[in-house]
Each structure stands twice: as structure tokens, then as C-alpha cells.
Amino acid sequence: MMNTKKSMRVALPLLMLAGIVGCSDSDPVTQMYEVTVTNLSNSQPLSPLAVALHSQTYSGWRVGESAGTGLEQLAEGGDNSMFLTDAVTEGAIATFSGAGVVTPGAAERIDVSVNSSTDLRLTVATMLVNTNDAFAGKGGIDLNALALGEQITMTLPVYDAGTEGNSERAGTIPGPADGGEGFNATRDDVNIVSRHSGVVTDIDGYADSVLDESHRFDAPVAQLVVRRVN
């Protein structure tokens, strides 16, 4: 008759050894983050968020340089699809899109994850839809030192994509202030990305503007919170 107790004594050490062998230091560890953007503006809805995880070799835009077509489409029409596709083509580790427009006072959280990386950065971008081509964003946020449970909080600066003149005229702004045209492949501005100087609006006597004082963004328009959860 087989000695069951003896068999168990042999089998258990083998199972324990198998478990140790299976837990290699080289196994990938998933890093997870909550990326939350809150709209702080009065009357500037934000287009669906574009979020990319990447290394320092990728850049969604550079001040003083021409915007890519993906960024142009995001900044003029709020469409983030080409911007995210371009990010993957240019080496981004993973990309994520928001579910929809983030209205003033509202917030959206996107849960992002990636296998462990020795160089992990974050880029976030979104259009101010009651403008010609303004976008709020931050590129290359360093996540490498962010420990489990820690978070980074910042406001997002506003940039001018430089691809469409800031005319503020009827038919040129896709947001609810106008309901006009979004992306147009013709570039009629300085063709470089820069910090946005703000909108003029009709309050300053610019009669052609479809914008009013509520559409201004002298104060921060969006807050970003990145929290590591795994």
C-alpha cells in the first residue's frame, strides 16, 4: 500500500520549490495610476482627454516648433484620435482617451496602467472648445519617483497651437459659444506652438467676437491630479 503521508511530505516541498521558481525578479509588475482632470473654467468645456504614457524620447509638442497634424486636429476640433495614434507611432508605451467632454466644474478620471518601466512619463492634452485652437496640457510629467499612494497635483497651462488665427469670429469655433467649424487643414497663423495670451471677447469692444467675458481663461482652466494606486 502506498504511504500517503510520505508522499505528501515529498510533494509539498516540490510545490513550494515550484512556487519560488515561478516568482522571478524579472516578472513584469503592473504600475497603475489614476489620472484626474478637473475643469476649473467658467465657460470653457474641455474636449475628450488625450493621455499618453511614454519615455522621455516622446514629446506631444514643443514650444517654438510647429504642431503636428494630430495636435492640430485636437486643438482646432477637439478630436484626439490622430494625436493618440501619432503618440503610439512615435514610441508611446500606452495611450488612453477620455469618455467625452469635461464641462465646467466637472472632472474625469482615467485609470491607466503599464508594465513596469525604468523611464515613465505622462502627457495630457485637451482643447478649450470655445476657442480657435487653444489647448491645455502638460507633457513629459516624470512618474518615476512617485511611490504607491503618492500623488502629483498641478494646473495645466494653456497653449496656442498656432495653426488657426484667433479670430473668434462666427463659424470658426466648434464649441457651444458658436457651433462653427472645427479642424481645417489650412494653416493661417504663425505655425508654432506658444503659450496662449487669452481671448479678447466682445467685452473689450471686439464686435466680431462670438465670445463674451465668461469665456476668458486668465485663471487656471484645469487641474491635473496623478495618483499611483499600484
Image (cartoon, rainbow, N blue to C red):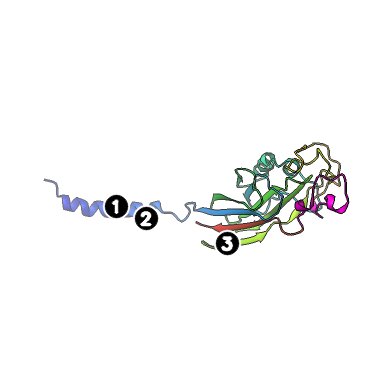
Q: Which residue is mark 1?
A: 14
Looking at the picture, tell me which residue is in the foreground, 38 or 213. Answer: 213
Separation of residues labelled 3 and 2 (CA atoms): 33 Å
Q: Is residue 51 visible?
A: yes
Q: Main secondary structure of the magenta part?
A: loop
Specify which label sits upstream in the sequence, 3 or 2: 2
Direction from residue 21 to residue 122 in the image, left or right: right
Question: In the rendered structure, which disc, 1 or 2, sits on the residue that comes first in sequence?
Answer: 1
Residue at image point 57% right, 61% down: 151
Residues in magenta, as a range: 194-217
Residue drawn at point x = 37 percent, y = 55 percent? 20
Q: Residues within 10 Å of mark 3 (few under 14, many from 20)?
A: some
Q: Which of the two discs, 1 and 3, sits closer to the camera?
A: 3
Q: Is residue 72 above or below residue 23?
A: above
Q: Given this view, does label 3 or label 2 mark the residue nearer the observer?
A: 3
Q: Position of residue 65 (x, y in %)?
A: 80, 50
Between 63 and 158, the one lying in front of the other is: 158
Q: Is residue 229 magenta?
A: no
Q: Amino acid at mark 1?
A: Leu
Does residue 62 show up?
no
Check disc 3 and report the residue beneath it.
151
Check the picture and name the quadrant holding the N terminus: top left
* Disc on res. 20: 2
Place of residue 184 in the rendered image (x, y in percent of width and height, measured from the top left): 79, 37
Please state which of residues 219 and 51 is positioned toward the viewer in this rendering. Answer: 219
